[in-house]
Image: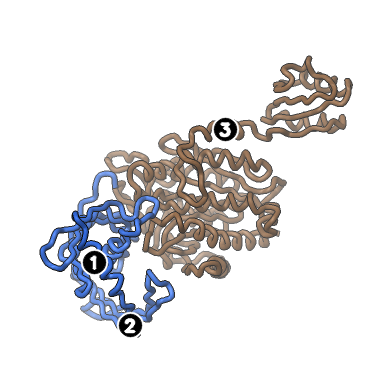
Chain colours: A brown, B blue
Amino acid sequence: QKVFRVIPQNEEQVEIISALASSMQVDFWQPDSVTLVKPKMQVDFRVEADKSFEVENLLAQNKMEYRVLIDDLQTAVDAQFDSKVRASSHSYKKYNNWDTIVAWTADIAAQNPDLVSRSVIGETYEGRQIYLLKVGKSGTNKAAIFMDCGFHAREWISPAFCQWFVKEAVETYGEDSVMTNLLNKLDFYVLPVLNIDGYVYTWTSNRLWRKTRSKNAGSSCIGTDPNRNFDAGWCTIGASSRPCDSTYCGSAPESEKETKALADFIREHLSTIKAYLTIHSYSQLLLFPYSYTYTYPSNYEELNSIAYAASKELSSLYNTKYTYGPGAETIYPAAGGSDDWAYDEGIKYSFTFELRDTGTYGFLLPESQIQPTCEETILAVKYIANYVLEQSY
Amino acid sequence: DIDNVGRKYHLKLVLEDILEKDNIVNCTAEILYHLGNKNAAPDVDFTIEGELKNTDEQDNIFYNRIKSLKKELVAQNIPDSHGNVPPEMEPIRLLARVAAGYVAWQNSTENTRYELAQIKDVRQVKRSDDYLEFDYMVLLHEFVSQEIIPWQMRVLWHPQHGVKVTQNSRQPKPAEY
């Protein structure tokens, strides 16, 4: 829902507002009712989202100046509410718990309505909303890049990166020519945490948990490995069929509500999504299909040179060495991965990042490394985005 | 591949000093994974080009600090959830890394990769001689299976005599893992 501010200049314009109020549901914030509207008075009113177009048309036709005070009332309200619920405040240089991240998604969208909007793509096993941020200047027929973080609960640097990316986007839009161009021409779908239940569990109970938190029939063991749960050579190699194992592939492809929500969204937006990026840790790798087979994808040469160049971009900042290549031979064969699935759906640029480090701290990467890790990684992501952009035009 | 023996790997690697990133040393190694007996650790032979850095000064500072403690050292969760390590615990962590390296070697096959994930608990063991002894409960991360494996290690250390893992045992996976 939108909130408008209009200053009627004369009786004629007051009449137009009156007519509007009788033709549709208008909630006056100031003054209290339409009967109190007078010329030269600030008039604020709320209308449903689907009526806002009509309102803007009417005002424009009658040459009435107006301002959109609140572009998305729900998000603004959420931002207020979530701020009070926040356990501690958000920091891009620290690991944030889930409640803090939720509040941040509302805040960042409310503060940057022309660049960021928030939506829900589904619910987790434990009933939590899975939030998605759409980042980009609004436009028609835009190509998109999908990026997710937080597949594996213990890989805390991953959600930290997604948050950092959005921050960079809103902060450097209009100043950094590369980012400005990217956001003008492309949309970025950023999913800050997919496996929310798992992430919460790492904060409350077991820091090194990996999987989702769903119950498994006939077993006391919990959880499925979300990155073995996609329909890509599902459970054929590098995955376990035992619920107690860390790489359990699930009872069926997309058995997990989280992976199904992601897959559904991507399927629905297949025509616009040109690249898929999924962020993990650790090992400092940039991987592309396939992991479910040693066979090379059809555009292997192209993916390999993109990975080479993106890795080089990344290392240019702090000399962090990345290894790149197809998943199966670079890390290990593993079926059911989201990158392979997205690729086979037709998204020809599909990459998995394994961020810092290579084992010194592993999953417990110190907060002091969040900033440098994010800064170097974003260079690689921007490189890939630019490449994809150039291919689309 | 070596018939009836196993598989040998020839490696050229670079050793990088964790504490001084610019200090690098070239190394060549031969690793032999034995056929058949999967319980035998792989054979490792290596040559280092040049010398490893002398750490006597830091070793002695750490040694003397622990020796002068009034009570035996006890600590948990190194690093903590956010990756923090109190500065005085850093040598304890490095010692664990070395000891875990030994445990990893002893349990390695061509299909494993072990990394030290976290020290859950460390207790100093009182000794009447010059050695420092620590009992560690650590979590190892095995890459291929992605499992977190609790492991107990008894570690002896002396500035002049180096590190020795006198005893170690794999622990059962607790319920929440």
Subunit ID for the residue under disc 2: B
In the shown orientation, is residue A93 left or right of residue B32? right
The Cα–Cα distance between marks 2 and 3, rounded to whole angstroms, is: 61 Å
Circle 2 or circle 1, nearest the eye: 1
Circle 3 or circle 1, nearest the eye: 1
Q: Quadrant of residue A196?
A: top left
Q: Earlier in the sequence, mark 2 or mark 1?
A: 2
Q: Which residue is mark 3?
A: A80
Q: Which residue is mark 2?
A: B51
Residue contact between numbered discs 2 and 1, judged by CB atoms under 8 Å = no
Q: Whole-percent x and y of residue A303?
A: 55, 66
Subunit ID for the residue under disc 1: B
Residue that lies at the very extreme toward the bottom in this rendered image = B50
Considering only vertical position in the picture, is B129 above or below A279? below
Dots 2 and 1 on the same chain = yes
| Image quarter (top left, top right, bottom left or bottom right) of the C terminus of chain A | bottom right
**What residue is at 56 percent from the left and 62 percent from the top?**
A380
The Cα–Cα distance between marks 2 and 1, rounded to whole angstroms, is: 23 Å
Depth check: give the residue in front, B126 or A343: B126
Can residue A249 be seen?
A: no
Q: Which residue is mark 1?
A: B63
Considering only vertical position in the picture, is B105 above or below B24? above
**What residue is at 43 percent from the left and 57 percent from the top?**
A281
Q: Amino acid at mark 1?
A: Tyr
Q: How many marks?
A: 3
**What residue is at 51 percent from the left and 39 percent from the top?**
A102
| Image quarter (top left, top right, bottom left or bottom right) of the N terminus of chain A | top right
Q: Amino acid at mark 3?
A: Gln
Considering only vertical position in the picture, is A11 above or below A303? above
Depth check: give the residue in front, B159 or A343: B159
Local crowd size for mark 1, using a 10 Å CA cut-off: few (<14), some (14–19), many (≥20): some
